[in-house]
């Protein structure tokens, strides 16, 4: 790319070679993004995956009680109430993104989700999730990692 500064006019002029270089750089960044659109994820799919992940985490806690032999009626009631709370969660906003290198390096994309969730008490919480390939929720992530998501 070639840029020339005309000192008298104090304007920046871009030559044809410089403009073609800029267009090539845009194409290099845009083509992987456009090719990855067929793997995009809708907000409804993301919320369904997050609900499934939360139910799975709850069942893992209940399974641990079962292995320890501490299953009783109150524990079962708590598990049932927890599943009802998960089903009643309201997703106020769901933002889906991918890490920048993922556009170039991954054949099947992984998604990161920022979800603002309202519970039964009306409390809003912001949680960050890492969705892997093949509709698998890998786990929760941090706000720092979300800052690196495009």
Image: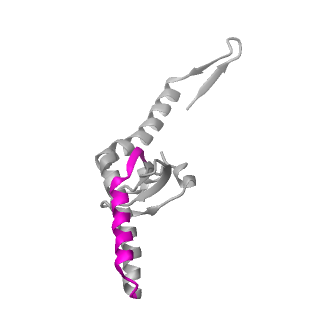
Q: Which residue appears at 33% of the width and 67% of the height?
A: 80
Quadrant of the frame with the N terminus: top right
Question: How many marks can you see?
Answer: 0
Say whether residue 123 is visible: yes
Q: Nearer the viewer, residue 55 or 46?
A: 55
Q: Which residue appears at 43% of the width and 41% of the height?
A: 28
Q: Which residue appears at 38% of the width and 61% of the height?
A: 132
Q: Position of residue 134 (x, y in %)?
A: 30, 61
Q: Nearer the viewer, residue 41 or 101?
A: 41
Which quadrant would residue 75 be assigned to in this image? Answer: bottom left
Q: Which residue reaches farthest bottom?
A: 69
What sort of colour scheme is used for the picture? one colour
Q: Which residue reaches farthest right?
A: 7
Q: Position of residue 107 (x, y in %)?
A: 35, 57
Q: Which residue appears at 35% of the width and 71% of the height?
A: 77
Q: Position of residue 39 (x, y in %)?
A: 30, 50
In the rendered structure, does residue 82 fall within the stretch colored magenta? yes
Q: Which residue reaches farthest front?
A: 74
Which quadrant would residue 136 be assigned to in this image? Answer: bottom left
Q: Note whether 127 is above or below 55 in the view shown.
A: above
Q: Note whether 23 is above or below 86 in the view shown.
A: above
Say whether residue 107 is visible: no
Q: Position of residue 3 (x, y in %)?
A: 60, 26
Q: Nearer the viewer, residue 77 or 64?
A: 77
Which quadrant would residue 49 be assigned to in this image? Answer: bottom left
Q: Taking 13 as reference, is 55 left or right? A: left
Q: Note whether 43 is above or below 79 in the view shown.
A: above
Q: Note whether 61 is above or below 138 in the view shown.
A: below
Q: Which residues are magenta?
A: 69-96
């Amino acid at each position: 790319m070639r840029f020339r500064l005309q000192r008298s006019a104090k304007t920046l002029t871009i030559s044809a070679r410089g403009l073609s270089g800029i267009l090539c750089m845009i194409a290099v960044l845009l083509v992987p993004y456009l090719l990855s659109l067929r793997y995009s994820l809708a907000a409804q799919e993301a919320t369904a995956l997050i609900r499934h992940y939360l139910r799975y985490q709850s069942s893992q806690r209940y399974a641990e009680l079962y292995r320890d032999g501490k299953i009783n009626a109150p524990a079962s009631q708590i598990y049932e109430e927890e599943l009802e709370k998960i089903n009643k969660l309201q997703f106020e906003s769901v933002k889906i993104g991918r890490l920048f290198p993922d556009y170039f390096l991954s054949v099947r994309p992984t998604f990161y989700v920022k979800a603002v969730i309202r519970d039964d008490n009306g409390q809003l919480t912001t949680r960050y999730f890492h969705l892997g390939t093949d509709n698998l929720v890998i786990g929760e992530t941090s706000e720092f990692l979300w800052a690196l998501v495009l």
